[in-house]
Image (cartoon, helix red, strand yellow):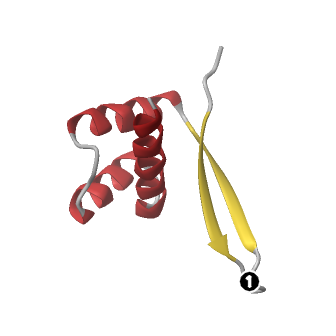
Amino acid sequence: MELMFWVHNVNKGEDGSDDINKLKLTKEQSTILEESFKLHSTLNPKQKQALARELNLRSGQVEVWFQNRRARAKLK
């Protein structure tokens, strides 16, 4: 069974409407993100860029994933 994880990015489109982009992460990407989160729940810009480069993601996608993960951790 394949696990799927989604990262939601909400951006304002040219017309002012919300543009929601979903990113499907691989199991490997999710594992690396989780391991990184265990070490540091927040990232500085250099860490974020390095992780994004390693995972072939944009730094904004990594940032949103960490924001969502911190929110989930807070709910537990």
**Residue 66 x, y percent position in the rendering:** 40, 48
- Name the foreground residue: 63 vs 73: 73
- Quadrant for the N terminus in the image: top right
Query: From what the image shows, is residue 1 above or below residue 39?
Result: above
Residue 38 position (above or below residue 15)? above
Q: Residue at x 35, y 54 (%)?
A: 53
> Which structural element holds mark 1?
loop
Disc 1 target residue: 16
Residue 17 x, y percent position in the rendering: 76, 77
Q: In the rendering, at what x and y percent does residue 28 appear?
A: 45, 30
| Residue 63 as seen in the image, left or right of residue 1 | left
Image quadrant in which you'd find residue 19? bottom right
Where, by quadrant of the figure, is residue 35 drawn?
Answer: top left
Q: Is residue 25 left or right of residue 55?
A: right
Direction from residue 23 to residue 70 in the image, left or right = left
In depth, the one of 74 and 38 nearer the eye is 74
Q: Position of residue 47 (x, y in %)?
A: 24, 55
Amino acid type, label 1: Gly
